[in-house]
Image (tube, rainbow, N blue to C red):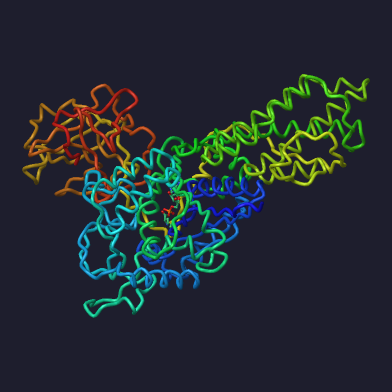
Amino acid sequence: MPKTPFYITTAIDYPNAKPHIGHAYEKIVADMIARWHTLQGEDVFFLTGTDEHGQKIEKAAKEAGKTPKHFVDDMSAHFQKLCTALTLSNNAFIRTTDKKHVKTAIEILKKVNSKDNVYFGTYEGLYCTGCESFKTEKELKNGLCPDHLKAPEHVKEESYFFKLSKFHQQIKQHIEQHPEFIRPESKRNEILQRLQEPLQDLSISRANFTWGIPVPKEITTTASTKKHIIYVWFDALLNYISGIAYPTKKFQKYWNNAHHLIGKDIAWFHTVIWPAILLAAEVPLPKTVYCHGFLTVDGQKMSKTLGNVVDPMAVIEKYGTDPLRYTLLRDVPAGQDGDFSEKTLIARNNSELADALGNLLQRTTVLIQKNFHGNIPVCGTLTEKEKSLEKSIPDLQELNTLMEKYQWHHVVEKVWNYINACNKYCNDTEPWKQTNDPERLATILYTLVEHLRMISILTWPVTPASAEKIACQIGQPLGKLKDAKFAKKTKGTLAQAQILFKKIEQKTVSPSLLAIAKTTGQQPTVNSFAMLNLKVARIEKVENHPNADKLYVLTLDAGERKQIVAGVKQFYKPEELLSKQIVFISNLKPAQLRGVESQGMMLAAEKEGVVRVLEAPNAKPGEQVFVEGITPAAQQITIEDFQKVTITTKDKKAAYNGKPLQTKTGTIYVDIADGAKIK
Ligand code: ME8
C-alpha cells in the first residue's frame, strides 16, 4: 500500500539579523523528523524559509542603509547558507517576498474577505515590533514585552480586521477533539486555558509603514484614508500553503498530512490565528503543531546586548555539522528548554561520537582490511554473544512510536545505547585475539559490520554525513528503516578508511562562537545591565559642593581614589555617609557638574520621596558588583545609557531582572521598601 506523503515545516525566520543557534536547533529537529519519515519510505516534503516583511525588517534595513528588498536578499542568503551547512534535507526554501507567495497571500485574503470575515475599523493598542504583534496589558511584565524587554508602542490607527472571534468555538472544539493538534500536552493546556477568555478580532493591516504586501483593491473601502499593507503574521503563516503551491495537486498531496514545528513563543499564532485563517479560507487544518523549547547559552537567555548570541556557522566551522546536530538532538529534551554549551558539545563529541561511533567503525574496518583484504567475511556460527547483541537492536516499532510522539531525544538515546552495546560486544569478543580461529574471527567481524550497516541507517536522521560515510566505508548502500535488521548474507568490499570524528581538546567557550548577530552596526538599545561596570567604594570624605546647595563632593576609595558629585544632601548628613561602602558606576564618562569633575555616579534607590544609597558593607573597596551570568562592560557609557537600565529593590536587596546585585562576598543591600527604582 502506498504510504501517506508527509509534510513538515519549520517557522520561517525573521532575517532582521543573521541566524542564531535557536534557528539552527529548530531546523535540525525538523530535519531529523523529515529524514525519519524518508527512512520509512514516505514521500516527504520539508519546507523552511524566511519571513521578510514587516516593520522590524523595514527598521533593520533602514539602520543598515539599504532598501528592504536589498537587505532581505542579503540576509536571507545567510539562512539559506545555514541550511546547506546543517546538511538539511529541505525540499524548498520559501521567502515571503517570492512572487508566488505574494500571489497566494492576496488570493487567500480575498477569499477570507469574500466570506464576510473582514471589516474596516480603528485599532488602538500596544504594539511590540520585536514580536510583530499587539499586546494586552496582561501580557506585559512591568510594562515591558517579556520576550523583548521593551515597552510596546501605543498605536491608534485605522485597520482592516479579521473576524477571529467568529471561529473561537470551532477552534476550541478542534483542539479538544484532536489531542494531537497541539503538542506537547502542556502547550495544549495553556492554549485551551487562554481560549476560556473571549477572543478579540485581529487587526490584519498596517498603514504606518510600507514594507509588506498591499491590501488588494477588492478589499479596500472608501472609508480608508490610507494605503494599507497586510499584517506580517497573516502574510507569513500563509507560507505553509504557498510553499507547496496552493491550490495545485502538489498542495493536495502534502497538505493532508501537514506538521508544523515551531518555538514555544509563537504557539498562539499557529494554534489559534492560523487555524482561524484556514477555516475562513475553507482550507483543512494541519495535523499537528509541535512547540519546541528555547535554547539558552551557558544557562543564559541569548541577547545581542549580552553578546552571547551563538552563530551556528561559527560552531560548524569549528567543530563540524554532525557534532552540533548530535549535541542538540541528544542534549535538549523534546518540548523543553535546553542549554547550548561548547563544553557539552566537546564532551559529547569526544565520548559518544569519536570514542563510541568512530572507534567502532575504525576497529572493525582495520581488522577486516588486515585479515580479509577488505572483504566482508562470511558469517559462521552465531554464538550467544551475537544473539545477545542482536537483542540490543532498538525495536523499530518503539522508535517509530517515539518519533510519532515527537520524543526524538529518546530515539537518539536508544540508538546510541545500541552503539555502546556494539562496542561492548567488540571488547568482550576481542577479535584482535582471534587470529588463530579464522571462522570465529570472521563471524565477529561480520557481526560488527552488519551492525554498522544498521547503525548507518539509524543514525542517518541524526548525523547524516557520518552515517553516509559509514555506509560508504563498509561498502553498503544506505538502507531504509525496514533494512535495519540482522541479515546473515551481507557482502561487499570496504572502501578507503576515513576518520569519522576528530577528538577535540577540552576548552572553555571561545569568544569566536559568540558572534553577535550584527547586521546594522547599531548600538544595543535593549534595557541591559551588561552595559554597566559597577564597583564598591568606601566614602573617605564628604564635602559641600562649592556651587550647588543640594550636592556633595565625595572622595572615594575604590581601590583607587575617585571623586564624584552626589545629589543626596537632603537625605543624608555628612557623618551618615562617611565610611559607608557604596556602589558606583565606574565606567561612566566623567562629567563637570557645576564646575566640579564627577568620575562616576553613586547608586541610590528612590521610592515615594525616600532615597537610600546602595551598600556593600562586607565587600572590599574596588570589588566588582555583578549579576550572575552577566559580564560587566569595559567601555565607557553615558548617563543616558544608564537610564535605560532598570534596577529595582526587593527584600532590601537591589536586583536586575529578578537577580540580585552582588559582590563575591555578598549581596547589595538597600534600606528601602520593595519596588524602589535605582537612580
Ligand atoms: O518568530 N531557541 O521568527 P524568529 C529555540 N518570523 N528556538 C528559537 C529561539 C531560541 N533561543 N529563538 C527563536 C518568527 N526561536 C516568525 C515566525 S512563522 C509563520 C513566522 C525559534 O526568527 C522561534 O520560536 O523570531 C521560531 O520558531 C523560529 O525560531 C523563528 O523565530
Please tell me whether residue 208 is drawn above or below residue 473 in the rendered image: below
Q: Is residue 195 above or below residue 237?
A: above
Quadrant the C terminus occupies: top left
Q: Between residue 98 and residue 621, name the one nearer to us.
A: 98
Q: In screen coordinates, is 38 left or right of 499?
A: left
Residue closest to the eye, 33 or 338: 33
Give how far across and how far down residue 515 sits, in percent: 49, 48
Residue lying furthest front in this view? Answer: 1
Determine whether, in the image, residue 460 is placed left or right of residue 535.
Answer: right
Residue situated in front as seen by the camera: 479 or 358? 479
Within the image, what quadrant is residue 481 found in?
A: top right
Q: In this view, does 13 lie to the left or right of 412?
A: left
Image coordinates for residue 420, horizontal then vertical, percent: 68, 27
- At x 34%, y 65%, the residue is 231
Q: Which of 90 and 352 is in front in this view?
A: 90
Please name the residue shown 46% across and 39% down the image. 335
In the image: residue 127, left or right of residue 107: left
Instruction: Tell me what residue is drawn at x 75 percent, y 35 percent.
Output: 452
Q: What's the residue at 80%, 42% (across, down)?
A: 473
Asked where in the image residue 220 lies, by quadrant, the reply is bottom left
Residue 345 location, x and y as percent? 57, 36
